[in-house]
Image (tube, rainbow, N blue to C red):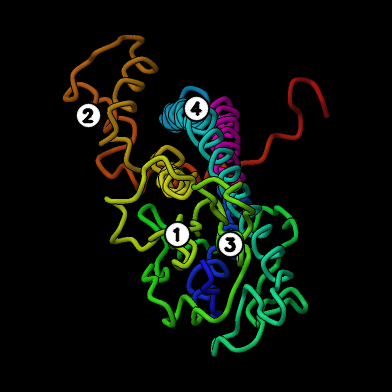
Amino acid sequence: GKFRVKKTSLQAGMLKQQRYLRNIPSDVAANLKAGATQVKKMILDSTRATIYSQLQKGSKEADRAITISAYMLGAALRAVSHLESTDIINGVDLAAKAGYLKGHIDEFLNVAEKVSQSTEHCLLDTAGTAAATFAAKALAGEPCDTTLGETTATKKTTAKLTTKGHTGAANPSNDAGDQHQAASTYNCRLFSKGNTDGLGKTGSVQNGITWAAGYYRVPTTADDPLQILNLQESAAGTRDQNSEWQKLFAAIAKKPDDGHSNYANNSKTMDSDPEATELLSKVLLNEKGKSSTDIKKMREDIFTAELASVVDRTFANIHNEKLPAKVAGIE
């Protein structure tokens, strides 16, 4: 517990994790907004196609437009269902976990940076001979903003935090004098539970003290170095599944993604979509469960065999159409 943390350890651990955690809420908000925007576009396309079908009433073009309208509305409902049942709750969950972990890291760094024993500080520079200190939202020259971040709808990188761990995380080796700990002559009261150099007095501090939500663990033996949680991706299978960090990685696996297939406009591939097949049966024949062969014949009767290009052309016509000068008696 006497061994203090060097800058090289902070760089590969706390500081990078803190920066990426800070980005997560904005990245979640950006993906949720993008998903909602996709829904809005589908609804608008459906509405415009419905209006266009009325202007082309009685023609093949009207049949194409109303089919597209129904399909786009169905796609929008599918996207809304995914948004409300999956992405919103998963996004809030991920943002909450990221905020929780960043808060613990920030508190640890702010306390440790200010604690010293005589001239010996808890956080050291790379050489392990001087204190690592805060200046202009940086710790020992490395970006480290311990304030609350603004949540925006702009996507931000969280790439180093994955579903398995932290890419490039520090090796958890605890040998005294390596890149993670200073020599045993440098003491930090925060990192030992013993009386002489630590937090406790006459054994009043119990075992199990952690910093930064369990990233650092104070050893039960006074002179042992800090225990560092292994966040390397290779340790995913052996890491405590109930730890706050592991729960974060599990939440990342379910993070909102505006590129999910449920947000896609697949109108040009209706011929390979089971939902579209059933929809065509209902819309065109008012029947359910028609065979794919029957539906293919109906679809080609409306769109020809070149479905994708005809859908493209129909969408172009829908968006280029202007209402007549008089609509429903209104000039």
Q: Position of residue 270 (x, y in %)?
A: 32, 36
Q: Residue reaching furthest right?
A: 331
SS assignment at label 3? loop
Look at discs 2 and 3 and give the one toward the viewer.
3
SS assignment at label 2? helix
Give the alpha-carbon distance from disc 2 to disc 3, as whole Å: 44 Å
Tell me the quarter of the picture where residue 157 sits. bottom right
Cβ atoms under marks 4 and 3 closer than 8 Å: no
Look at discs 4 and 1 and give the one toward the viewer.
1
Report which residue position mark 1 lands on.
Answer: 221
Q: Position of residue 287 (x, y in %)?
A: 31, 9
Q: Amino acid at mark 4?
A: Ser
Give the alpha-carbon distance from disc 1 to disc 3, as whole Å: 42 Å
- Residue range (magenta): 33-55
Front-lying residue, 312 or 291: 291
Q: Amino acid at mark 3?
A: Lys
Q: Residue 68 has which mark?
A: none
Taking the image as drawn, is residue 197 in sight?
yes
Q: Position of residue 48 (x, y in %)?
A: 59, 34
Front-lying residue, 12 or 173: 173
Report which residue position mark 4 lands on.
Answer: 85
First along the sequence among labels 4 and 3: 4
Q: At 36% across and 71% down in the image, what residue appears?
A: 173
Give the alpha-carbon distance from disc 4 to disc 3, as whole Å: 24 Å
